[in-house]
Image (cartoon, rainbow, N blue to C red):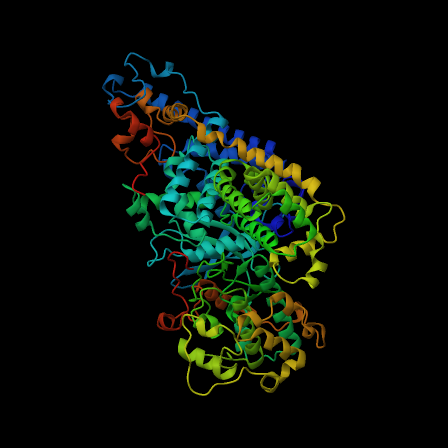
């Protein structure tokens, strides 16, 4: 299943890592981001202490949610802000990924666009710290780029019609940065198509009156209405593939077919196990379909044939090796469900930390904002709404509202 | 299919020649990671001036840009400027000539990176094959123009075909067909349809090796039920199903185009050179046969199908092809006929074509190094102009471009 062709893809060559390597990359990116914040603060501090104007006259936005420094404080004595940890960075990125998924669904884009956009976001932040690139400034650009790379182009004009206050310039501003930041690797291999194929294969085998012995065994396991059971599981699997598979790190660690099976495992463990046994088990009758084909020519799609042809000469069944991998992949996806449970308070805390890091001028009275996006004038609504609008504040906390999509 | 992939495979396949901005995904790529981390540093040092222009992707971009020199312009068109360039010599490698294709900001397309560029980059980043042009690097210029650094190739098959002072032997033709089919096989195996196969997109390296170029119209195989546009492939090489407005088609469109290139190599002039789309379809009907329900079941239900009226020509058989393309011999004609079948489902695949008897019979395919060449200055200029053309165009002059192109891509939902 892990075919030769996959090993030639940029996804495999450039964007697959072992867990420890991935953690190291993230730690390095985080360290670079942290250093950049420190440097920005250092500069701001120098500016503040050399500025002629007394600190007290520095205009400080009255509605800022951050503590207002008192004029008596010497800028040199203000400590450096606490920067985000790699985990916090990841949490923030994943939160925005969920936002982007909602945005994509609002547009009614196909899952391939949504999934590609999510992978772009994740890959970009693998090498670019949120300290310098707040994801909230990148979402529309990434989604727009994904519509182009997935052959589902929607003009910036259309984007702007659907998202209030968005301008084409804002979408395009960081397009080159994103494209370069993901190494121009636009082709993403998703498990979605393989998953569709697998389910089709399973359904047609189950529906076939004279299926091979393996499918009969599987059919019995699946209870009264096997077709229905598969269809229901497929629905849940698709949901996992368009959410947990993207929010978790499985794209970095597993091949698309492994992710498909992992998602099927989450959706219906017994079904996934039975399917793997049928396709790759010791007594797999699928593995010998090449010969069988001569006898019954119907019902098998092309993919099956090719796979079977590859499997046929192999002596050892794949299932015993495959199952632990699939379980590990499924577990990794399941763990990602925690991202949905993150409380707004927690995210708010992270965002507040980041805000402080990126805006030394608000604490020192001099210096300039750090990172992208801060060069555009902020809309007042983003800078801490009054407490009575708390509910709305939660929704607006991380950028513009997506209502109306 | 055991453990997560990556480390084990990349050692064999992580081709050192390609530039991977973030390392190879090996477990031990510490120096590269350190480099990535450093870029973060560089960024913030500079951001007093303008935070948006001095961050890592740009810095990485600058590093890539600095690897190349720009020597002189090879050609300029509405779509792109092509410069001859060199990859600077390093301690270990000497300077290598490259073609730098700078995509101009398109006046019609105001939405950032154009679709042609997106496609070309997307597919060339993935397709690595001796018979497919290599994309060495991508960077953006100061003015946010996209620059593709491509393998430098001196000439193209069209120049060879047009240069009537040269005689092309059947072994030569066999060799070019073989190399084209190999490149095409790899595209199709990777689920990519080229959609613009024609002689001037088949480029020739100085050592005679042929390479497929210009992936500006390429696309992946579509998901079932998603529509595809039929406005692709330069008219003279376009298969009948596209004239009938088929919304679902396959890699067999490329096979048909290459079949016509095969004819052209023998005739030394385009076999079917229609003046309009309608005329082109007439030529197909006249020379290859009229598509009917009999020779192509289902053809009449294609959206643009129309009964051409007039005399129905039966799909041409061996006799016709043997008369017209006798030089190819029996096995050559057999292959040609399989490539030019009216019904796309009956056309052979690239893989099957490679298995054709023709290739293993005498005269054997000429070794690339011994193939006729059209080197020298003129060749370079011509390839420069090939690279800068918009995909799907035959001519560079603005007048002709308007009329004869196959390019009105429908980007709307599900198209393309």
Determine whether A345 is above or below A175 in the image. Answer: above
Residue that sits furthest to the front in the current view: A224
Quarter of the image with the N terminus of chain B is: top right
Would you say A220 lies left or right of B138 here?
right
The residue furthest top is A72
Location of residue A55 (image quadrant): top left
Q: Is residue B288 left or right of residue B4?
A: left
- Estimate the x, y position of residue A71 in percent, counting from the top left: 27, 14
Relative to A95, residue A219 above or below: below
Measured from the top left, where is residue A303 in percent x and y? 61, 56
Front-most of A202 and B201? Answer: A202
Residue B236's x, y, as percent?
47, 75
Whether A353 is drawn above or below B241: the answer is above
Q: Is residue A236 above or below residue A349?
A: below
What's the residue at 64%, 50% (across, down)? Answer: A3
Split into 4 quadrants, where in the image is the C terminus of chain B?
Answer: bottom left
- Res B20 seen here: no
For the residue pair A35 and B132, the one nearer the viewer reads as: B132
* Residue at (44, 28) in percent of width and height: A341
Residue B191: which quarter of the image? bottom right
Left or right: B44 as drawn, with respect to B192: left
Q: Residue A26: x percent and y percent?
A: 52, 31
């Amino acid at each position: 299943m892990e075919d030769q062709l996959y090993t030639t893809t940029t996804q495999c060559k450039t964007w697959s890592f072992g867990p420890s390597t991935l953690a190291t990359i993230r730690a390095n990116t985080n360290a670079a981001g942290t250093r950049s914040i420190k440097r920005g603060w250092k500069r701001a501090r120098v500016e503040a202490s050399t500025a002629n104007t007394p600190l007290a006259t520095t205009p400080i936005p009255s509605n800022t949610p951050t503590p207002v420094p008192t004029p008596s404080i010497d800028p040199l004595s203000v400590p450096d802000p606490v920067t985000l940890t790699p985990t916090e960075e990841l949490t923030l990125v994943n939160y925005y990924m969920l936002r982007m998924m909602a945005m994509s669904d609002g547009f009614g884009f196909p899952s391939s666009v949504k999934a590609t956009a999510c992978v772009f976001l994740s890959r970009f932040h693998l090498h670019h710290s949120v300290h310098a690139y707040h994801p909230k400034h990148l979402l529309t650009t990434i989604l727009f780029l994904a519509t182009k790379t997935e052959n589902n182009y929607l003009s910036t004009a259309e984007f702007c019609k659907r998202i209030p206050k968005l301008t084409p310039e804002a979408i395009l501003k960081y397009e080159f940065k994103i494209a370069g930041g993901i190494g121009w690797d636009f082709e993403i291999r998703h498990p979605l198509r393989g998953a569709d194929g697998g389910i089709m294969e399973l359904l047609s085998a189950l529906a076939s009156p004279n299926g091979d012995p393996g499918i009969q065994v599987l059919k019995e396991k699946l209870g009264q209405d096997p077709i229905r059971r598969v269809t229901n599981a497929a629905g849940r699997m698709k949901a996992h593939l368009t959410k947990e598979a993207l929010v978790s790190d499985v794209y970095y660690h597993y091949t698309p077919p492994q992710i498909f099976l992992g998602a099927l495992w989450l959706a219906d463990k017994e079904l996934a196990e039975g399917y793997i046994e049928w396709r790759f088990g010791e007594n797999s009758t699928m593995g010998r379909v090449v010969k069988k084909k001569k006898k019954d020519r119907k019902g098998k799609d092309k993919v099956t044939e090719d796979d079977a042809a590859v499997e046929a000469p192999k002596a050892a069944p794949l299932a015993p090796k495959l199952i632990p991998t699939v379980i590990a992949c499924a577990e990794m996806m399941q763990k990602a469900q925690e991202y949905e449970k993150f409380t707004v308070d927690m995210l708010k805390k992270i965002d507040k930390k980041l805000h402080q890091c990126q805006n030394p001028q608000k604490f020192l009275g001099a210096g300039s904002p750090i990172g992208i996006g801060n060069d555009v004038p902020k809309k007042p609504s983003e800078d801490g709404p009054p407490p009575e609008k708390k509910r709305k504040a939660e929704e607006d906390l991380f950028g513009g509202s997506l209502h109306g999509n | 299919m055991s453990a997560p992939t990556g480390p084990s495979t990349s050692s064999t396949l992580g081709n050192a020649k390609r530039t991977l901005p973030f390392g190879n995904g090996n477990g031990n790529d510490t120096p590269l990671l350190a480099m990535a981390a450093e870029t973060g540093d560089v960024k913030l040092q500079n951001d007093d001036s303008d935070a948006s222009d001095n961050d890592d992707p740009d810095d990485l971009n600058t590093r890539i840009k600095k690897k190349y020199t720009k020597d002189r312009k090879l050609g300029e068109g509405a779509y792109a400027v092509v410069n001859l360039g060199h990859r600077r010599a390093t301690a270990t490698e000497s300077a290598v000539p490259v073609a730098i294709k700078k995509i101009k900001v398109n006046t019609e397309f105001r939405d950032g990176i154009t679709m042609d560029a997106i496609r070309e980059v997307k597919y060339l980043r993935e397709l690595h094959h001796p018979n497919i042009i290599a994309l060495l690097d991508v960077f953006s210029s100061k003015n946010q123009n996209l620059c593709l650094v491509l393998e430098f190739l001196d000439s193209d098959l069209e120049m060879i075909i047009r240069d009537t002072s040269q005689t092309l032997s059947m072994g030569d033709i066999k060799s070019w067909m073989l190399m084209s089919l190999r490149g095409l096989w790899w595209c199709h195996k990777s689920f990519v349809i080229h959609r613009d196969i024609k002689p001037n997109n088949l480029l020739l390296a100085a050592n005679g090796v042929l390479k497929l170029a210009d992936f500006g119209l390429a696309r992946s195989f579509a998901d079932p039920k998603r529509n595809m546009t039929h406005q692709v492939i330069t008219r003279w090489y376009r298969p009948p199903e596209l004239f009938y407005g088929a919304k679902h088609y396959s890699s067999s469109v490329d096979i048909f185009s290459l079949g016509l290139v095969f004819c052209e190599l023998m005739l030394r002039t385009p076999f079917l050179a229609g003046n309009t789309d309608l005329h082109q379809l007439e030529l197909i009907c006249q020379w290859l046969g009229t598509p009917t329900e009999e020779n192509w079941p289902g053809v009449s239900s294609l959206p643009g199908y129309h009964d051409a009226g007039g005399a129905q020509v039966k799909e041409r058989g061996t006799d016709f092809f043997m008369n017209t393309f006798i030089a190819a011999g029996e096995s050559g004609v057999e292959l040609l006929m399989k490539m030019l079948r009216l019904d796309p489902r009956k056309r052979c695949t690239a893989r099957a074509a490679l298995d054709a008897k023709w290739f293993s019979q005498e005269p054997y395919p000429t070794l690339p190094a011994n193939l006729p060449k059209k080197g020298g200055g003129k060749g370079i200029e011509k390839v420069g102009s090939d690279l800068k053309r918009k995909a799907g165009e035959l001519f560079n002059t603005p007048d002709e471009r308007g009329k004869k192109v196959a390019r009105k891509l429908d980007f709307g939902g599900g198209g393309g």
